[in-house]
Image (cartoon, rainbow, N blue to C red):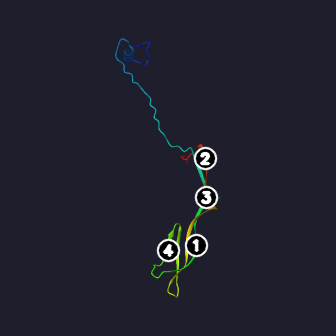
Amino acid sequence: MPSDTNLPPAADKTSFSATNARLDTDVRQPMVLPVIEEQALISREVVESGRLRIRKTVQQVEQPVQATLQHDEVQVEHVPVNQFVADDAPLPGSRQEGDVLIVPVLREVVVTRVLLVEELRISKRVVEEEFTSTVQLRQEQIQIERDALTPDSSPNTP
């Protein structure tokens, strides 16, 4: 078979005519071109980028504390009465007069009459006083050191 000088030696005429048919503009066949699109796939991965070393220490510090304290003081006053209680009268009992509690003190005498010897007048008042004391307080202190990972100290490498 004679070969065409324009054709490469390995090409035959059937492949040449098929190539010509594809390139021929007279053949108006629709061409389908695939549309290709790239998409990025994003993912995350936890990577250790450094480490922290945390030290916590507790220190005790003396600190003065001031406070106002309250306490009750009771004042007892002896008031002599020395009066006999009438035979038909009831015995006197404790009574309250304002902030004062009055407690009668009785004694029997040989005459078999009751003698009111004295009265105790009891009152109380609230006393405030300033008080200062030293107390031990504890304080925590935190120290943080950051260790950056080097490529050789990656946790995934053995």
List the residue tagged with mark 1.
76
Q: Earlier in the sequence, mark 2 or mark 1?
A: 1
Q: Which quadrant of the figure contains the N terminus?
A: top left
Q: Give the residue type that dot 4 points to.
A: Ser
List the residue tagged with mark 3.
138
Q: Which of 139 and 156 is in front in this view?
A: 139
Asked whether residue 123 appears in the rendered view, the answer is yes
State the residue at coordinates (55%, 74%). Answer: 120
Residue 38 x %, y %: 44, 29
Q: Nearer the viewer, residue 154 or 130?
A: 130
Q: Earlier in the sequence, mark 4 or mark 1?
A: 1
Q: Give the residue type that dot 3 points to.
A: Arg
Q: Give the residue type that dot 1 points to.
A: Val
Q: Which of marks 1 and 3 is nearer the N terminus?
A: 1
Above or below, 12 relative to 68: above
Q: Earlier in the sequence, mark 4 or mark 2?
A: 4
Q: How far apart are marks 1 and 3 (CA)?
A: 45 Å
Q: In which quarter of the image is residue 130?
A: bottom right
List the residue tagged with mark 4.
94
Tag nearer the camera, 4 or 2: 4
